[in-house]
Amino acid sequence: MSTLTNQWLALSLLVGTALPVASTPPAAAQSTVAKAASPAPYIVEWVYRAKWGYKEEYLDLFKKYQVPVLDRLKQLGYVVDYVIYTPGLHTSEDNRWDYRVVITYKDQAASTHESEISKQIFPDQAKLRREEQRRWELTVVHWDLPIRIVDPHASN
C-alpha cells in the first residue's frame, strides 16, 4: 500500500471512531435533558396552631381524615412524600405552631386531587364535614405555603 493510502485509511478510521463519540452528549448533559423534561416537584407546607389544650384532639382528627388522603395520594403517585413535624421546644404564643406538614407533590397539577380522593375514601360526607368542622374549630392559626428548595451551590 502506498503511504497516501495508509494515511487516508488512518484518517478514515480516526474520523469513523471519533465522530460518534463526539456527537454523543456526556452523561451529565443527558441527565440535565432528562431533568428538564420532567416537571419540577411542588412542595407545600401546611402549618397549624391548635387551641391550648386541644393539640391531641386536633392531631387525632387530622390523622383520621387527612393522613388517609395523603397516603392514598402517595399510592397513586400524586404525592412523592410527606412529613408531619411538631416542635421540640416551646416558643412565645405569637410564634407558636403545633404541626407542620411538608408535602412534596409530583408537580403542581398533582396537588389538586385531595377533594376527589377524600370523597372516594369517606363515603359518609356529612360525618366528614362535621368532624373536619370540629378540627377547624380547634385551629387558631393556619396557612398553606408553597416552598422551594434553594441550591446553595447554584449561581444566581
Image (cartoon, grey):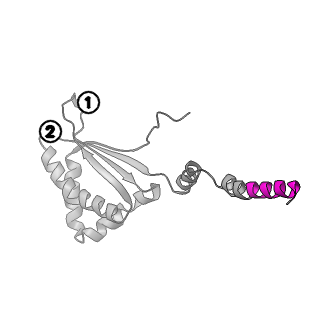
Q: Is 9 part of what is drawn in magenta?
A: yes
Residue at (69%, 52%) from the top-left corner? 22
Q: Quadrant of the C terminus?
A: top right
Q: How far across and down, in percent of the image, does residue 70 sit?
A: 30, 58
Circle 1 sits in a helix, a strand or a loop, which is it?
helix
Q: Amino acid at mark 1?
A: Asp
Of 149 and 91, the residue lying toward us: 149
Tell me how many marks there are.
2
> Residue 24: which quarter of the image?
bottom right
Q: Answer few, some or many: residues within 10 Å of disc 2's Cα (few below 14, many 20 plus, some between 14 and 19).
A: few
Q: Mark 2–mark 1 contact, CB under 8 Å?
A: no
Circle 2 sits in a helix, a strand or a loop, which is it?
loop
Does residue 73 lie above or below 31 as drawn?
Answer: below
As measured in the structure, the alpha-carbon distance from the residue carrying label 2 to the one carrying label 1 is 13 Å
Q: Is residue 68 left or right of residue 109?
A: left
Residue that numbered label 1 is attached to: 94
Q: Answer few, some or many: residues within 10 Å of disc 1's Cα (few below 14, many 20 plus, some between 14 and 19).
A: few
> Residue 122: which quarter of the image?
bottom left
Q: Is residue 12 left or right of residue 67?
A: right
> Residue 93: which quarter of the image?
top left
Residue that numbered label 2 is attached to: 52
Which contiguous range is marked in magenta? 2-15
